Amino acid sequence: MSKKFNFLLEKIGARFESTLAKDQVDWSLPGEETEQVDRVILMTLDTLRADHLHCYGYPRPVTPFLDEISANGFQFNQASTSISTTVPAHASIFTSLYPVQHNVLKNGHRMNDGFMTIAGQLAKQGFSTAAFVSTNRHFVAGNIVGGFDHVDEPSDSHYIYRRAKHTINAAMEWVSQRKPDEKFFIWIHLFDPHEPYKTPLSKCDVLQKESLQDHQQQKEYFLEHQKVNADFFDRGEEEMMEILDAYDAEISYMDSHIRRFYKFVQQQPAMNEKMAWILTGDHGEGLGNHYWMGHGKNLYEEQTHIPLLFHFPSRSTRGIKIDQFVEHVDIFPTIMDLTNASIEEQSQPIQGDSLVPLLQEKQLDFNKEYAFITRRHFDPKNRPEKVDAFRDNFEDGEKFALRNEVYKYILKTVGEDEFYDLSQDPYEVNNLIGTGLEDESRFRSALTDKINQFKQNVDTAPQSVDNETIERLKDLGYFQ
C-alpha cells in the first residue's frame, strides 16, 4: 500500500459516539446450558458492497452506526451471497437452499410454496412474524414472504421503491404494538443503495465535510486499491466519482435510519433481552469494477462479497471479527439454533451450517469447505442481436463459482473459466487459470460435483410472476 493511502486507512479506527446499550449484562449464546433467543431482527440491505463499510476497511466513514454494531458484536469478514440478484438471494437466505435448488434464478421467478422458510418455522414455534420491504414487485410476487403473519410493502404509488425512512416507520409502528414478553421475528428490507440514487450529496454530512484533498485521495483509493476501471465511464474519472459519491450518500442515509430504528427498540428495554440483530447485504454492485456497473451478471467479489453482522443487545461483546468464510445459506440454521427452533425434514435438505460455534468463538467446531455461488439466468430468447459484453445486461450460458478463504474458481458453460487467489488478489485482476496451480483442478472437480448434485434433484421449471410485475421490474432495470 502506497503512503498516500495512509491517512485514509488511519481513519478506519476513528471513534464514534455510541448509540448502543450501555452497562450491558453478560448473556451467553445458546448452548448446552444457556438461554435461547426469543426475538430476531433480520435486516437485508440491498446492493450493499462490504468494501463500502467503514468497519470493513473503507476509508470514508459513511456507516457510523453499522460500525458501532460491528464494534459491539460479530463481523464476518468473508461472507458470500449465493447469487447477486435480489429475489433469488433472499430465497436462499430464507430457505437455506442454493438457487439451483429452489429454482428462483432471477427477479421475475416465483418460489414454490413447498419450501420450508425461516418465518414459517418460527411461526410454528409461537413467534409473531412480520416483514417490512421497500419494493412492491419483488417479494410478495416472488412468494418470498411465506410464513409471515404481517407483510408491509409500499403502495403502487411508490413502485420504484420507498425510502428507508418510510419502511423503518412501518416497522416501528408494528414493534410499538408488541407485548413485552412476545416472541417475534422481524425482517426489514432497505433498498436505498440500489439505483436510482435519490439522496442529494448536499444532504450527506460525510461528503459535505470531505476536503478537496480528501476527495482526490478517495479517487486514488478507488483506482489503485479497489481497482475500479475509470475508462468504463463515459466521462472517465469525473463520472466515476459522481456515481460512487452518490452510492455512498445512499449508504449514509440508510445507516442513519437503521440507527433510528435501533434507538427506538432500545427504548423498550424488555424487548432487548434475548434479542439478536442480524444485518447483511443481499449482494453487491459492480460500480465500474470489471467494466460493469450493476449486478447479477458477474461472480466477482464486488458483487458477491457481502457484509454480515450479528449483535446481541443484552450481551457484552467486544468487536469480534471472524475470518472464516460463510454463506447466506448459513443464516437459516443459525436462527434456528439461536431460537432453539426445530428444522423439519424436506425433500431437499438445507445447505447451510449454523454459525453459533463461531459466535461462541469455537472455530474448531465449524467446518465449511467451500462457498457455492451462481449467477442469474439469462433467457436466450432475450439475447440481443449483437452482445456488447461491457454494456448489455445479457451473457450467454451459465456461471458458477466455488470459493474458500484463499481461492475462487469461476466455471462458465460458455467461455473460459477463471481462477483467482483472493488472498493476494482480492479484486480478481489476475486470472490464474492454466498456470499450473494444483488447487485449480481440485476446485473445478468439486464445483462440477456440486452442480451435478444439485441439478439432479430439480425436476420442475422455474415459475414466473404475472405480466404486471414483469413490467414493474423493468422499471427497476431488472428484466430484459
Image (tube, rainbow, N blue to C red):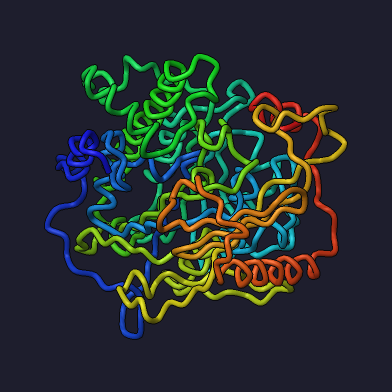
Q: Answer left or right for 115 relative to 148.
A: right
**For the view shown, which residue lies furthest in the right direction?**
381
Give the answer, above or below, for where 78 lies relative to 473.
below
Name the quarter where the N terminus is drawn. Answer: top left
Would residue 122 be seen by someone viewing this image from the given angle? no
Name the quarter where the C terminus is drawn. Answer: top right
Residue 3: where, in percent of width, then height?
20, 38
Question: Which of these two is toward me, 157 or 94?
Answer: 94
Question: Which of these two is toward me, 138 or 86?
Answer: 86
**For the view shown, which residue lies furthest in the bottom direction?**
32
Give the answer, above or below, for where 52 lies relative to 104.
above
Would residue 253 be seen by someone viewing this image from the given angle? yes
**For the view shown, which residue lies furthest in the left direction?**
23
* Image point (17%, 65%), residue name: 25
Residue 51: where, in percent of width, then height?
39, 43
Residue 277: where, in percent of width, then height?
37, 55
Number of numbered discs visible in the structure rendering: 0
Q: Residue 220 falls in which quadrant of the image?
A: top left
* Image point (74%, 50%), residue name: 398
* Image point (44%, 64%), residue name: 405
* Image point (62%, 25%), residue name: 159
Residue 425: where, in percent of width, then height?
44, 51
Q: Residue 117 falls in which quadrant of the image?
A: bottom right
**For the view shown, which residue lies furthest in the front direction?**
435
Question: Which of these two is toward me, 340 or 1?
Answer: 1
Q: Answer left or right for 334 relative to 176.
A: right
Question: Which of these two is toward me, 448 or 317?
Answer: 448
